[in-house]
């Protein structure tokens, strides 16, 4: 059980309480997903029962859906959350608490009113659990990836000269929703022409032209779990330069996929891909890390970058997304979501490459 | 100019620097909307030029799109943001800084390394500006509301027995995207049958039945500005009880709209609507405040609730959304986005009521 595993982490860190406010962390431990923007508090004493404090608007849903904890309701005023929390912390006689995140005014209030209690921000105990996906989580990630494939294919089909970027996003998101996606994993990127040189280019009403690169980067959500894919196409016949870029990034992507296995250091995976782009003359144009973990959050540990000391483990799910970005000209990126196994990386997203 | 107006607020609060990290606040002052989840820092000295510190991934887009400030690039490591920030704060000789939000580790780092500088969280100076929409903002809110109407109408058309909640969301969101919405203003709610008793019920794969209440709550985004609407329909012929609930909430909604004008205190608007539900026997089943401000954020000041002392001003944009929620039975809500004028409230969302 996840709370028991967190308690083991707590023993290692020598703390007697962990306070959770991040909604994905609340969901991870209780199965309750809140969509209000009020502050939730899940307080987990090392000895004792976890309690979830929720605002009135979320109370009925939390009562029906939150497992592994008591559910208590707070009024909408922040003061009251703090007061309920303090009561609970005192009741459990907690002295040394770590937490994932807090609004600053609430943090300041807590340390003022609990001046004998040590309060330390530390997400590590939770990431230590969340970065290793269990079987159920993997099945959700597979489902999200399947829907993501459907989305990217619908988007690619809609790409042609004369169409607007957001119209492509519309088709992709519609297809994902109809196949059960719980919204979009992040703001869909449809970056065309010179805009494709922005790695985070969102999408605009720009009309797509013949000869444009079009980067389509999107993801679905299934049972809270996100997937992430990028495909890049050229509208019409690619130029020699475009072909060279596509071929290089595709080789870098394949190389990274091939070297993934348990116990490889993340920066080595990054280096494998980066080396290919460098040798092709585009090292400086690969301006971001190779990838990131993905799960309930779209960006989570482990990180694949040139400085990451993360060691890949079975059950990690990461993106692999080399790219080349040339300001004023355009950019390309190829990305898949990958499950780390003992001896290999398994592509969860499997849409065609359109190369 | 917005930065000049913020500086006037800063003079009133007697501070010499304001630090902004919230992406909507960055957008409000610079016109640059970032979609990375890295921390941005816009530092605004009272005397001197504002500087926007961005991560490498966002640098090209920020250089091209951010106005009213210098743009400087940071590496992805948090340490470096803090160091760049500290350098800038020392360069400008700032002593008394307010900020909107900060990740706690960054806050702790800043106060440790800048122990002679006062750092206070205070969003008020920014909300004082953002709560009064200017002409350009109102035109964006009108456009978002127009698209929101189209979305809710497409959703309502899709409601019939046998259809799943998320299929209705798919139609509504698709229609909004095709009409230029930049994504969705918040997670679309399609809450049917007993699930309609959850005010924040998101949407599931529940199949809609004859006799169900279906609450459809959604919004579009235009140039960053959000709109918000809710309509509730009964599938088939409503029962007497359902009709009574719909009629009451509709009267409460109309009453609230009618009493909106400049200088009314927010709790009075709430009381006007609440009184009608109370007199109809459903006072206790109206479990949330009447509404909230809306703009770049979906929930922002002013707040319409029974305790809100906010005084409505020309240029405020608020939702009006009375509802009745009966656990185990179902719930209803009717909501519009409303612009406050001197003598009246103007409905920006204008979709049919389907009553």
Image (cartoon, coloured by chain):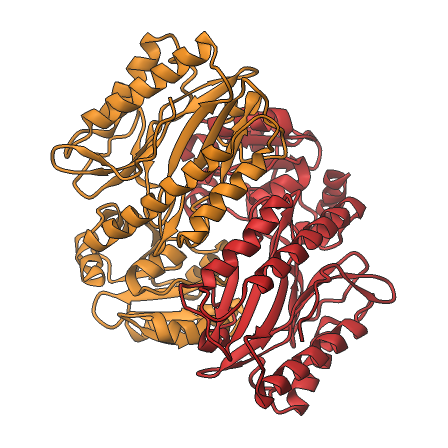
Chain colours: A orange, B red
Above or below: residue A65 compared with residue B5: below
The quarter holding residue B241 reads bottom right
| Quarter of the picture holding the N terminus of chain B | top right
Left or right placement of residue B202 versus residue A14 in this view: right
The quarter holding residue B44 reads top right
Res B115 seen here: no
Left or right placement of residue A93 versus residue B317 in this view: left
Above or below: residue A354 compared with residue A237: below
Res B260 seen here: yes
| Quarter of the picture holding the C terminus of chain B | bottom right
For the point 43% across and 16% down, the residue is A285
Above or below: residue A74 compared with residue A106: below
Relative image position of residue B66 (x, y in whole percent): 64, 30
Q: How many marks?
A: 0
Relative image position of residue A56 (x, y in whole percent): 49, 74
For the point 35% across and 71% down, the residue is A65
Q: Residue furthest left?
A: A343
For the point 53% across and 48% down, the residue is B101
For the point 44% across and 30% down, the residue is B80
Viewer-nearest residue: B348 or A92: B348
Left or right placement of residue B261 versus residue B224 in this view: right
Relative image position of residue B201 (x, y in whole percent): 47, 68
Left or right placement of residue B91 versus residue A32 in this view: right
Viewer-nearest residue: B44 or A49: A49
Above or below: residue B115 compared with residue B66: below
Relative image position of residue B327 (x, y in whole percent): 46, 82
């Amino acid at each position: 059980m996840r709370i028991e595993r967190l308690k083991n982490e707590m023993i290692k860190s020598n703390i007697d309480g962990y306070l959770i406010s991040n909604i994905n962390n609340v969901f991870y431990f209780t199965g309750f997903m809140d969509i209000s923007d009020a502050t939730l508090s899940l307080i987990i004493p090392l000895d004792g029962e976890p309690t979830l404090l929720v605002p009135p608007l979320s109370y009925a849903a939390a009562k029906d859906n939150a497992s592994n904890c008591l559910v208590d309701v707070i009024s909408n005023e922040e003061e009251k959350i703090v007061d309920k929390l303090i009561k609970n912390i005192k009741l459990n006689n907690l002295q040394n608490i770590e937490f994932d995140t807090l609004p600053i005014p609430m943090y300041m209030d807590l340390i003022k009113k609990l001046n004998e209690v040590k309060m330390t921000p530390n997400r590590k105990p939770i990431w230590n659990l969340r970065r290793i996906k269990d079987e159920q989580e993997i099945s959700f990630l597979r489902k999200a990836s399947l829907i993501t494939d459907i989305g990217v294919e619908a988007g690619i089909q809609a790409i042609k000269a004369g169409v607007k970027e957001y119209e492509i996003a519309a088709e992709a998101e519609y297809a994902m929703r109809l196949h059960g996606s719980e919204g979009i994993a992040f703001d869909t990127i449809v970056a065309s022409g010179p805009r494709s040189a922005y790695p985070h280019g969102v999408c605009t009403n720009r009309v797509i032209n013949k000869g444009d690169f079009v980067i389509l980067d999107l993801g679905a959500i299934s049972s809270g779990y996100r997937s992430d894919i990028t495909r890049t196409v050229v509208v019409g016949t690619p130029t020699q330069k475009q072909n060279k870029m596509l071929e290089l990034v595709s080789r870098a992507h394949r190389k990274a996929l091939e070297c993934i296995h348990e116990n490889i250091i993340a920066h080595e995976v990054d280096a494998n891909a980066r080396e290919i782009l460098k040798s092709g003359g585009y090292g400086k144009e690969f301006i971001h890390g190779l990838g990131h973990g993905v799960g309930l959050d779209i960006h989570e540990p482990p990180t694949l970058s040139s400085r990451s000391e993360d060691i890949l483990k079975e059950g990690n799910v990461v993106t692999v997304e080399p790219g080349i970005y040339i300001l004023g000209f355009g950019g390309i990126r190829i990305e898949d979501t990958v499950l780390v196994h003992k001896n290999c990386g398994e592509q969860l997203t499997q849409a065609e490459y359109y190369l």
